[in-house]
Image (cartoon, rainbow, N blue to C red):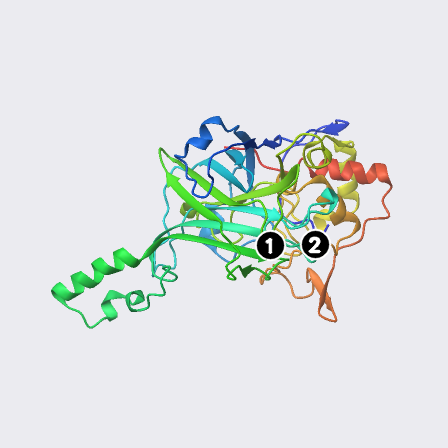
Amino acid sequence: MKKLASMLLVAGVITSVATADSAINAVKVKADLDKVDNKSSVWSGAKFSDVTLYPQTAIVLNDKKANELNQQAKAIKAKIAAVYNDSKIAFMIKWPDGTKSVQQEGKTDVYGDGFAVQFAQNYSNPKELPYIGMGSDGRPVVIHLQKATGITFEPNGNGDIEHQINPNQTIFFEKDLANYKERVKTVGNADYQRSFISEGFRSMTQIKDGSDQATMNMNYDSKAWSGTLSRSLKDSNLNLDAATIPVAFAIWDGAKMGRDGLKYLAPWTAVILKKGDDTLVNALHGKIEGDVEKGKEIVAANGCAGCHQVAPTDAPSLMAPSLVNIGGYASADYIRESLVAPNAAIVGGYNRNAHSNTPWYNLDNGKRISAMTDYSFLEKGDLDSAVAYLKTLKVGAK
């Protein structure tokens, strides 16, 4: 199980495992969705669904304090809604957060809260969706990211360079310096939002060709954040004009030093725009057949814990990605593919603390080849049970 990307708790003898969250039913509106925020009237008729986001635990950071802060992290319950018109789609995500954290310029140990919305470029086959978070080889994703930041000066929308200089490094004093600082506030940008295309680890590329017209907003109120995204249903990077689309969500908690891969992830969630085709809904939210107890035995018998951390009570293993919470943000089809085709999506974030004799992958003519065993030899019933068990591996929500 070397490729199974990040993730735990709970097991019982049952013949099917129900997914925790349901699909999101998007509501069609006539309103303009060009500029949407948490106060927009379009949300009054929207249908909010509960979506659980789980701590991403595949890789241990080389940051003792951050690891301690997140050691007992629980899942987070968010409420998410979607609305759309003939040309655009918009999402709102609301999640609890007892502390408002804002990233500050010049600070290397202060991190901002944030959220991201991810789309698969190709979702025609629900069994082969990209890896959550970064996409995977041959399966690109488009990611929209918003972070809570203080005033920053690049980019500020008008190519201003003069006011990107630290005030202490200018030639100004007294009144001139006060004028300079006031001008900085005027032209500075406190709205950090980016869009990316990614096709696997270390492949994230910012969209800068002018094709991206997405707008995002964040608002903090009463120990909770709300974030909104509005984007075109169809552009040069993405076509969301379909009956049902898969969407994934992520949030960062700056108070827990969340950044990069230290975040909370929701699994691919089906967003229904038009009734009729349940293929994607069933793949992402249908019951999973298999005997959980038998699956637990199969996982143990095949030595998975020899490389992976399986339960939170297990000692952390740096020989392979942790499976703690794998059942929370990985689909059953992704887990199954991880077992029978480990090269399909390789977790490339090899931890520098891992032993050099146990690499997570090998290179063959520049292509990453997973070091994990191919378990396609398992009988279908045993494979079903292993997947059912692995889907139970997830922490509870706080």
Nearer the observer, 194 or 12 = 194
Relative height, residue 395 to residue 168 (above, below): above
What is the number of the mark on residue 345?
A: 2
Nearer the observer, 83 or 196 = 83
What element does badge 1 sit on? loop
Q: Nearer the viewer, mark 2 or mark 1?
A: 1
Nearer the observer, 163 or 259 = 163
Packing grade of label 2 (10 A; few <14, some 14-19, many >=20) is many
Amino acid marked by disc 1: Asn
* Residue underneath mark 1: 237
Relative height, residue 6 to residue 93 (above, below): below
The picture quadrant where one finds residue 151 is bottom left
Packing grade of label 1 (10 A; few <14, some 14-19, many >=20) is few
- Rendered residue at 36%/59% (across/down): 156
- Rendered residue at 72%/66% (across/down): 367
* Residue 173 appearing in the image: yes
The picture quadrant where one finds residue 386 is top right
Nearer the observer, 123 or 209 = 209
In the rendered view, does 346 fall on the left or right side of 190? right
- Rendered residue at 42%/48% (across/down): 254
What element does badge 2 sit on? loop
The picture quadrant where one finds residue 28 is top right
Which mark sits nearer the N-terminus, 2 or 1? 1
What is the number of the mark on residue 312?
A: none
Return the x and y of residue 334 as percentages of the image width and height.
Answer: 71, 45
In the rendered view, does 327 fall on the left or right side of 373? left
User: How far apart in space, not on screen, are marks 2 and 1 (Cα)?
Assistant: 21 Å
- Asked if the residues shown at circle 2 and circle 1 are in contact, with their CB atoms under 8 angstroms apart, the answer is no
Relative height, residue 94 to residue 358 (above, below): above
Return the x and y of residue 358 as percentages of the image width and height.
Answer: 69, 62
Amino acid marked by disc 2: Ala
In the rendered view, does 278 fall on the left or right side of 263? right
